[in-house]
Amino acid sequence: MLNILVTGSNGQLGSELKELSSNYEYNFFFTTRDDIDITDKENIKSFCEKNSINVIINCAAYTAVDKAEDDIENADKINHKAVKKLAKISKEKNIKLIHISTDYVFDGRNFKPYCEEYQTNPQGVYGKTKLDGETEMININPLNSIIVRTSWVYSFYGNNFVKTMLRLGKEKESLGVIFDQVGSPTYAAHLAYTILEILPKIENSKVEIYNYSNEGVLSWYDFAKEIMKMAKIDCKINPIETYQYPTPAIRPHYSLLNKAKIKKEFDIEVPYWKDGLDDCLKRLGERK
């Protein structure tokens, strides 16, 4: 029986893992910052020893991209230093570590989907701290461990783009949404399912990186248009450029992830982005 520690279990991915957990014969420990302090090595070690943890799925992250520009210390503590501690304990205790990272490790200036080995060049604090966490994990190299880079995550749970569009679409007659940032959304339920399916197949002597998002390519504008269409909300979506909606942190203009590696090595199919949106809207009671 695998004993699986899931950190950040109140977030979007952690919540979806919790919902799926009853389908698997594993013993899950869903934790938040109140249960375990991942910035404290001894606290993590004690929890892992007490509960005979075999696997850690690290969903905990500082994800407030704009706030991170000023809150560098806390972003670094969670996205970088905590990952280093988790990796060290995983190495010492022979624990399998699955760490979630982001497309923000790239600068977004590419012209074709990013493969795992492409040059990283984060443009903001969030991306930089996430990359620093990746680097620590790779250098420490706990066995049978992986990094999963993902993008544009949304879910039935938490705050996200889909829920924001649904709310604003009902309040306003029209909305301006950015059309010059291109990528693919990730439905957290699909990512959670993939993680649990590939978990027993992860066997590697060095940390491997895998990309995961839903299939397809679109802009935030396209995404918003489809949300309104599926939910039958009468709100006009107007395309705007990034400069018309300035933010403290720079967003990648192109962050499409190449998923060939994870599909080939684990023999999985990745669902199309509209299928994920359809399911999410149904769960939210918004698919009409």
Image: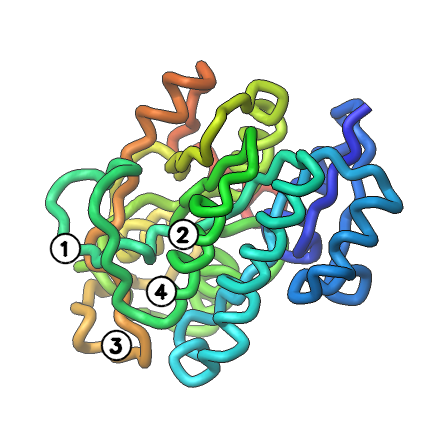
Q: Residues within 10 Å of mark 1 (few under 14, many from 20)?
A: few
Task: Give above or below for 134 relative to 80.
Answer: above
Residue 135, label in figure: 2
Of 48 and 229, the residue lying toward us = 48
Task: Measure how far apart labels 2 and 1 are at the Cα level.
Answer: 22 Å
Report if the CB atoms under discs 1 and 3 are less than 8 Å apart.
Answer: no
Residue 240 shows up from this direction: yes
- Residue most extreme to the front: 92
First in sequence: mark 4 vs mark 3: 4
The spot of residue 134 in percent (x, y) is: 43, 51
Task: Give above or below for 179 relative to 6.
Answer: below
- Residue most extreme to the right: 50
Residue bearing the label numbered 3? 245
Task: Give above or below for 132 relative to 114.
Answer: below
Task: Measure how far apart labels 1 and 3 are at the Cα level.
Answer: 19 Å
- Residue most extreme to the bottom: 70
First in sequence: mark 1 vs mark 3: 1
The spot of residue 162 in percent (x, y) is: 47, 56
The spot of residue 112 in percent (x, y) is: 15, 39
Residue bearing the label numbered 4? 128
